[in-house]
Amino acid sequence: MDLLGKSLEELRALAVSLGEPDYRGAQLYHSLYAERQLDLARMTVLPAPLRRRLAAEASVELPRVARRHESVDRSVRYLLALGPAPESGASHSPAPTAIETVFMPSEDRQTICVSTQAGCAVNCRFCLTATLGLVRNLTAGEILTQVLVALAENATRLAPRTNVVYMGQGEPLLNYDATLQATRILLDPAGMALAPRRVTLSTSGILPGIDRLAGERVRPKLAISLNASNDEQRSRLMPINRKYPLGELLAACRRYPLRSWERLTFEYVLLGGCNDSPDDARRVARLLSSLRAKVNLIPWNPGELPYRIPEPGAVEEFRRALLGRGVPVFVRDSRGRDVMAACGQLASIEQAAALPAHVPSS
Ligand code: SF4
């Protein structure tokens, strides 16, 4: 039994099932997530017989760091080897699942870009992950473990604050329960104690997931991957738009209950000559006019896909056009381009080689 990803209630119940008082479960929860102590033998708050029993009946499964690529900008892309899907029952199968996680340090914080699925079935045309298809959903423990491994690997250079963004491989709202379970532990003051504004979930626009998220008491910030200014263009770039078109997506955004400090983030990958014209900018401003929103412009990162990097002049013109219409906008300089860690690049050749047979994307 993997302890990582278990909630406070689950660990309390585990303690009781082992004949211990339930507060032992709370101590285990605190050790795992607040202290980030992942070695059962060193959880000295627990009595030695319980530690031995836990070590015999449970484990804290950490992925193997299969590759580590450090960028000139000091961000690091990790290729992590997970075990096979837990339900397969073959926990020691030699064929691991590979995922990628990116650690991005800056002066006062680190941002950890986390995968929620291995591969992805959504099939956005500008994203290398889509070429892998969906391999499988990650468990809550496998989502959390990426944060823990990235923090442990960089322990000597950690800044005081940590941001977590669900922007790695996968569509988080298509792995809803595990993503939310991991989020509750990240945001729990008794768990990893991140502030709600420090965890962001980015979606391609899965409407039922957005509506469900709206009803959660504990939830991350929401970002929508927009990338187009009309339905025809968006359906071409993001086939998911045929199922959840822009009008319905923006209606879901309008009814989404923002907290007083919160804005919706719209991400817009600028593809040279494709979606970066002044007309696109005007249409985007119109689409977002009734929303409390900001836009992150992400000039496309070169990869193996047939798109062009936008001209610097086009990026600036796009930015000014949005700003001039009252839409807050930021140009995001992707980190780790040289090690294929940037937005849309997360599907390395080595990962494709390491992956077991997968379900092809539609
Ligand atoms: S951009 Fe996100 S949702 Fe789209 S294919 Fe890539 S990983 Fe999946």
Image: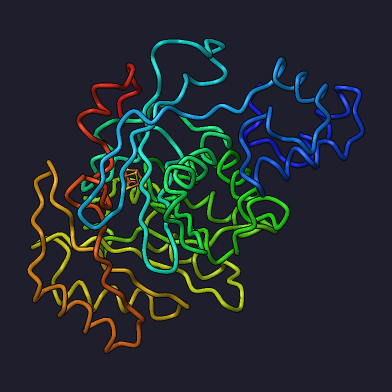
Q: Quadrant of residue 104?
A: bottom left
Query: Left or right: 295 with respect to 147?
Result: left
Instruction: Report the front residue among 128 and 339.
Output: 339
Q: Is residue 98 above or below residue 161?
A: above
The C terminus sits in image quarter: top left
Relative to the observer, which residue lies in front, 94 or 347? Answer: 94
Locate residue 289, reporting x and y percent. 39, 80
Q: Is residue 131 above or below residue 110?
A: above
Q: Nearer the viewer, residue 13 or 135?
A: 13
Name the residue rendered at 23%, 28% in the picture: 350
Report the label total: 0
Q: Residue at x 43, y 75 (%)?
A: 293
The scheme the figure's colours follow is rainbow
Can you give x and y, in whole percent of width and height, for residue 68 in the image?
30, 37
Q: Quadrant of the N terminus?
A: top right
Residue 139 appears left or right of 15? left
Rendered position, 60 above or below 37: above
Q: Residue at x 49, y 61 (%)?
A: 222
Residue 316, quarter of picture: bottom left
Q: Tell me where residue 20 appears, x and y as whole percent.
A: 90, 28
Looking at the rendering, the quadrant in which ligand 1 lies is top left
In-image side of 18 versus 91 (left or right): right
Residue 105 sits above or below residue 98 on the image? below
- Rendering coords of residue 25 (x, y %): 81, 36
Q: Which residue is drawn at the image coordinates 13% and 72% (left, top)? A: 277
Q: In the depicted view, which residue is nearer to us: 52 or 83?
A: 52
